[in-house]
Image (tube, grey):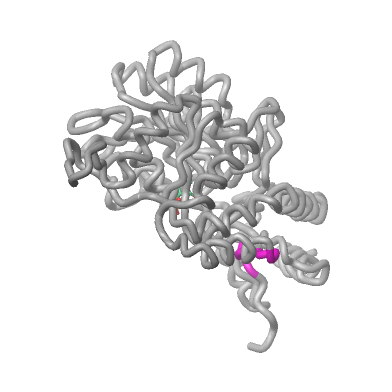
Amino acid sequence: MDRKKIYLSSPTMHGDEQKYVQEAFDTNWIAPLGPNVNAFEQEMEAYTGCGHAAALSSGTAAIHLSLKLLGIGQGDLVFVSDFTFSATCNPIVYENATPVFIDSEPDTWNMSPEALERAFVKYPHPRAVICVHLYGTPAKLDEIMAICQAHDVPLIEDAAESLGSTYKGRHTGTYGKYGIYSFNGNKIITTSGGGMLVSQDGEATKRATFLATQARDPARHYQHSQIGYNYRMSNVTAGIGRGQLLHLEEHKARKKEIYAQYREAFADIPEIAMNPLNPEGDANCWLSCMTIAEESGITPDMVMDALEEVNAETRPIWKPMHLQPVFAANDFIPHNGDGSSVGADIFARGLCLPSDIKNTPEDMELIIGVVRKCFGR
Ligand SMILES: *Cc1c(COP(=O)(O)O)cnc(C)c1O
């Protein structure tokens, strides 16, 4: 096939990244610390209003350290979004704690406050709640935070996909006790790989940095009173992040355009619904997704196959965690009274459309034409 590939969401570099990376080379700061790391943290603090930030090697590491900071371990329960990528919940298991999966609601596809309430009835004493802002759409944070506050349980926001999204005018990731961001290759901005732990609590992020650099006590000799990790971000990758951050708003604007274009192009096809946005927020529209009405007889696979024919990359919707073999023994709290799962329904009927900000008008026209054709338009 010689048709050019249209990507789901690939890195977009601008040149500024190279300038900061060059600086790291020129000054020989090729290490998991250095001026780019400090500056990237400060620039993210200024951009998100998160208070304090610790730059780490991945978003997964940031979730792991947030659990360490809360002292979560063997025998503890953690309520976590069911409809997400496995990186959200794997760190719970690293600490020998137990995830309880909370279903999504249909309005934003994120953690259902109703299911969360019911989880607290069944398990009154979880140690934390981890809530995701899937595909960049903010969750119902007011309702979720009210429940967490009523039960005095800390909230961790997995904002890996929602950097740049706001809820009621404030950035996602800045509402919980801890927030995490990811700079993996396909996220809205990337450092190739990396993440950040943020909190209004500066002592906590300082402790995260300490744990992320092998938990070395302040002594001249190498002394350790705790188990540490090698989780710090490198000064080279932080340089990429600094350059990317300059273009985050631009990326967001372009992602929003793509989403709006799809929505408009499929508006006359009642069998197609775009992923919902939260009216209380401003989503970064990281990935544009669609669901297909069951009665249509069209399956996500049919649409994905048709797009593959023109070399356009798609992706299934995240498969809910309660359907994953590795979590078969874990409890799941559904949103619906009849026990059916909102996340499983979206998974069965949905797909992610090519959402690359480098998509040209011709690419978009091609994708839209292929999808419309699947529905006989
Ligand atoms: C990407 C992602 C992560 C993990 O981030 P990494 O930087 O890849 O470790 C966590 N949660 C969600 C929802 C993600 O999409």
Q: Which residue corresponds to the image point at 48% horizontal and 30% vertical from the top-left?
A: 199
Which SS does the magenta portion mostly show? loop
Query: Position of 188 compared to 337: left or right?
Result: right
Residue drawn at x 51%, y 62% is 27
Does residue 303 appear in the picture of this structure? no
- As for residue 11 lying within the magenta part, the answer is yes
- The image shows residue 72, relative to residue 215, as above or below, that is above
Quarter of the N terminus within the rendering: bottom right
In the rendering, at what x and y percent does residue 258 appear? 75, 55
Instruction: Please identify the quadrant where the C terminus is shown.
Output: bottom right
Residue 137 rendering spot, x and y as whole percentages: 62, 39
Q: Quadrant of residue 369?
A: bottom right
Residue 274 in view of the camera: yes
Q: Residue at x 80, y 54 (%)?
A: 261
The residue that appears at 36% across and 30% down in the rendered structure is 79
Q: Which of 93/241 is in front?
A: 241
Residue 176 is left or right of residue 309, and the answer is left
Between 227 and 162, the residue placed more toward the observer is 227
In the foreground, 374 or 321: 321
Residue farthest to the top, as pictured = 150
Per the rendered image, the range of residues in magenta is 7-15
User: What is the x, y in percent for residue 361?
Assistant: 82, 67
Q: State left or right for residue 38 relative to residue 64.
A: right
Residue 324 shown left or right of residue 354 in the figure: left
Toward the viewer: 256 or 341?
Answer: 256
325 is within the stretch colored magenta? no
From what the image shows, is residue 23 above or below residue 263?
Answer: below
Residue lying furthest front:
220
Percent coordinates x, y for residue 257 in the rendering: 79, 52
Q: Quadrant of residue 173?
A: top right
